[in-house]
Image (cartoon, coloured by chain):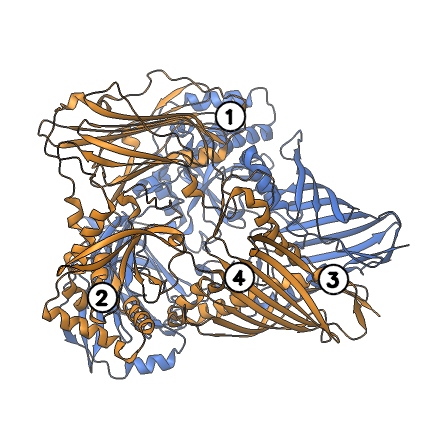
Amino acid sequence: MKVLTTLFLFLCAAHVFAADDFILLDYDWESSPTAYVPNDKEKDQSMVVLMEKRMYEMHYNAKNQLEAYMLIHKILWVNSDDAIDANNKIYLPYSQASDMIKQKVRVINSQGKVINMSNSSIKESKDDESEKTYKYFATEGVDKGSKIEYYFVLKYYPDFSGSRITLQSSNMKENVDVTIITPSNLVMKCKSYNGLPEMELDSSETEMNVLHLHVDTMAALEDEPFSNSDANLQYVLYKLSKNTYAGSNEVVTFSKYAQSIYEVTYIDISSSVKKKLQKVLKDADIESYKDTESKVRNLEEYIKTAFRISDQKVNAAEDLSSVCDNKVADEYGLLRLYIALFNLLDIDAQVVITNNRYDMYFDPEFESFIFLEDMLLYFPDLDKYMVLGDVFSRLGYINTGYLNNYGLFLKQVEIGGVKTAISQVKKIEPLPYDKVEDNMRVEVDLNKNISSPEYTFHREQTGYYAQSTQVIYDYVDADTKKKIDEGQVKDVTENMTVEHVDLTNTGSKFFGVKPLITNARFTSTEFVEKAGDNYLFNVGLLIGPQAEIYNEKPRVMEIENGFNRGYHRVIIFTIPDGYVCDNLNDLNIDVYQEREGERTMAFTSSYTVNGNTVEVTVDEYYKLLTLPVSEFEEYRSVINASANFNKISLVLQPK
Amino acid sequence: MKRILVAAILASGMIYCPQLSGQTGGELETYAAKYPNEAIIYLKDELHLNIRVDKTGLVISNTANQEKLQLEDRGTFFSKGGIEYSGWSPLDQIQASTLVPDGKKFKTYPVKDFTTNDVMEDDIFYNDTKEVTFYFPELTKGAHLKLDYTLSIQEPRFLPSFYFGNYAPTEHAEYTVTFPENLELEVVYFNTDAEQLHFTQTKEKGNITYSWSMRDIPKLPSDDYSPSLQYYCPHVVVYIKNYISGGKKVDIINNLDDLHNFYSGLLDQTPRGDRSNVQSVVDSITAGLSSDDDKVKNIFNWVQSNIKYVAFEAGLDGFVPRDPAKVCANRFGDCKDMATLTTEMLQMAHINAHVAWVGTRDIRYSYTELPTPACDNHMICVVQKPDSSYLFLDATASYIDYTIPTSFIQEKEALVHLSSDSYKLVKIPAPASEKNYIKENMHLTVEDGLLVGRSFSLYDGYIKMHFKNIFQNVPAADRLKLLEDIYETGNNTFVLDSIREVPTDDNLQPMQVSYGFRIKNYVRQSGNKMYINLTLDKDFSTEKLEPTRVLPYEIPYKHHFERTVSLEIPEGYTVEYLPSDASYENDNYFFTISYTSTGKEITMHSNVGVKALYIMPEEFATWNDMITQLTGKYMENIILKKQ
């Protein structure tokens, strides 16, 4: 995207720096380090980051060009074989556009011996596809209790539109230090997340802006079930706010981004390109569909199978004419194609730019391009979203990472005969629970071959539960199909023989339209245990394995789900002739959370008896995507209710 | 905008130059009918090995010609192509194109862009492997995917093998080798023979061409836990014994002596500097020890725990061990570095130790049938004890006892380097089932409906190695959660209350672990009866083999699990029912389950094990029969009745 790179031009400089003036070019580590003696808290840790220093330094050079260097300096203390294995090979990936100015590595072993590594032992690999270079080395002489210390200085091209420095990790850290130095005319804006202190401006500095943050001890953030760990790590975002020599306007704003996207997307179409676009519509047979949703859906299906996506930045992949000819497009080419096609079809499609909440949440308050990563289209008439480039997603079911996150929406408007774009940050709401269901009905007659009876199995899945099977089904060979088919049944237990299975509504064109239906028959010895002439029917296991959440440690992160979801299950079984069951009441479970009189999540099971036949109904749903830590116990009790149902065993005794 | 591009990534700047060629006449229909379940097949899979002798010596190249036919429309699914090569066989040239049916002809769309990348592998830290990738354009039903490339082979001992089989059906496969008539070439067949491969030999202008071909090759089976391709796929391996150059005979590999000579020469390239740092380690860890066994044990343990596995495989790095003094100081190395260091240290302690080459279990060849580098991929240290028995020391496994070889070289041959001109082949044993075990004594009580247990377990052999790894390697902070997952039994309400490794005087003793636990919802009650399944651990119950399986079932090592579970009969209850005893035994696997009661306590005793490394297809039915009987027994409960 050429347009965006021209947003930043810094022509004026008040203070010119010679190379000698850069702090980082003179940076060095302590000359005589010593072995580390851990305190009581550290002793139990597998490893501790004793120091992590990051510095970003930018100045104008003699040619009046902005020059930037960054430093990462770490000291790790390794206290287990695992930690040694994980850290005795160190990889420094960096963009091929950057230059590695200096790198130093040393080990201070448990006895205090200092082993300096020579640069000749540092290997290098290039990856042209990702345009990255890797410098990597195996640290020498590391034993348990060693310190591994390394730093490197890169000459790089700073991204003023927004950068993230993630500081917290799954290891405990000490002496975490970040400094950002910019020329006095470049005013930066920073924001810290998840409890990290804010960067402070050093008011004693007048010739440059120095922002700084220091944390003595940073706890490890351990993964927890039903959480979003990466987004919960402590991190800081920074971006250029103002170039005081160029004016007092905010440099990085959402509306500027929206405008530039608009300009490259909504382009004039020549009559020759129009013909090519009409050919695409003809090949996709869009004319044969009458309603908007069918048109959108089938056009998406066609493009996602017939066109190939390239992430190489070449003109041919962006130019609409070549895109139509070659059926190869990069993301912008694809965006132009969709917009142009929907324009021809007179379907209102808005561009939405967002990011994956599993990296971090889009912060509407911090106008930065860092959140503007992935492109979706929003169809106001359908109130549905579509992901542009992901061949595994379809209209209505975008990648779950975009749900519950904000996005930058832009739409074309005409003001006084001039077409332009207006943009707005809005939330992409999660889908309601009944759009994503995994329902099943299992029937068994225990009169027949009770130790290994035949079960009739019917399963209907919608939304994300059907996605992986429905979308890939057309692309796999017969053997894989067979494995997928059986896997649909074996989700209940691996320990079964599938006698028959057939799947209905496979194929991406059904995804989001019709449920994936599995009909099967299987036999298994898993569900009936024996005790003399008594039987134990493990009816609970028929809903498949259910996770149990333990409460060993206090919950730290809020509960976060991928999507809202529901499960409706029916189990019908016949008590064998001559037998009775006395503990059917175990089947009655009702655990739920209520807010303002409405159930927000629940696990409810009950049964009815008709002669020898028992019908068990199980309803489970989760209507809220996130819940605060204070409601963790309620969440846990519903999740664990299903785990408890899972363990219900009915005792069948002779009359 | 990086992440959302999940689909194939296309090479840039494609300009299509369609050319008409070939004939399509009903081809797609024919093959679609022949292979109704396949989306793609190989029409042609050829390899041509060309060996010449010029003034500089041997000049060897290897040309592959492959052509696939796409039988179904899969969008861009099959578009990515690529080949890997290393510095031993650099890429000379590569061409690829798509042939798209166009009426009765094909249009040719050549691939214009090839991307070369360094390959970074997880288990090898540094290598010189490169990967060329590209994308077949215009893929559609009926398209041909053509790939032709030539590698130049730098080392005459590293000739490729040719496998008659792919993971898609192959219409025609052919391997040819062309070589001067004054070159002596040896051919070795695996899982096939000359007749089956329609072997022919032709001679033209002083060059001989051997040719093997096969038609209608079904796709290779893919079963989990099976031996490698070498064990079942038909393949041909050739090697150069010698040739005449300038009137003189040049030996390459006439026999195992020559292979050993070649290897010996590589060992000689290890720098020999000051090794006093190694000596001082040896002195400190063997001080005061008189028995050789203790010295071996201490030295091996030192290398195991102090040298981390980091592999370098670029060029000669893959073959020449690094200076042991450097490995000792750096604290890392790969197998050959560790083997060399271990050997050096043992020799310093006057132990009869030697480095040895060995192939892991996925290599099927023996040195006598194929005396080439294709036979091995690993190095260890071999100690010959005064009683003529051997120890196979492989320090790449951090927690293995020095008395047993690593599991992945069981029953393989070691080529033991005795001196620069002498060697010995030694067969590596597979420890018996009795040596690799879990022996557990579990004591259970029922407290308020909760099943409460205490357990004392012994682990030995490879199983001990796994548990040592977990107990000693995982930091205290993460250990309990991990152990809870590992020890979970009964159901997932299992809570581990306490666990500890009981220290032993000698680390060769079985490892001893004791732990306590609780399980909710496990004891079933109805009326005045209590039902309990005492087979909490259902060993082997998931090992039933699929009826569609065709390949042998590979077992990592012979082993057995012996468990004694005692339940204290709760106050006021009596035993109403005990399941019957059962057992099964043949030469390769067995189980026994029995129940006894003293009136105060019920005891379930089970012993399940396997005494072979492979379950062969002819045994599948009996194996499954045993598993069925065993899992049947696992579904039985005792009944206690309230008086």
Find disc 1 in the rendering and name its residue. A42
Disc 4 marks a residue whose amino acid type is Gly
Find disc 4 in the rendering and name its residue. A566
For marks 3 and 2, give the one nearer the viewer.
Answer: 3
User: Percent position (x, y) of residue B514?
Assistant: 69, 38
Give the mark nearest the N terminus, 1 or 4: 1
Marks 2 and 4, how far apart at CA: 43 Å
Can you name the residue that lies furthest to the right here? B643
Tint of chain A: orange
Q: B213 and B525: which one is in front?
A: B525
Give the mark nearest the N terminus, 3 or 4: 4
Disc 3 marks a residue whose amino acid type is Asn
Find disc 3 in the rendering and name its residue. A585
Q: Are marks 1 and 2 on the same chain?
A: no
Marks 3 and 4, how far apart at CA: 24 Å
Check disc 1 and report its element: helix, strand or loop.
Answer: helix
Res. B288 visible in picture: yes
Marks 3 and 2, how far apart at CA: 64 Å
Marks 1 and 2, how far apart at CA: 57 Å
Q: Label 1: chain? A: A
Q: Label 2: chain? A: B
Marks 1 and 3, how far apart at CA: 51 Å
Q: How crowded is mark 4: few (under 14 residues within 10 Å), some or many (20 or more)?
A: many
Disc 2 marks a residue whose amino acid type is Pro
Check disc 2 and report its element: helix, strand or loop.
Answer: loop
Q: Label 3: chain? A: A
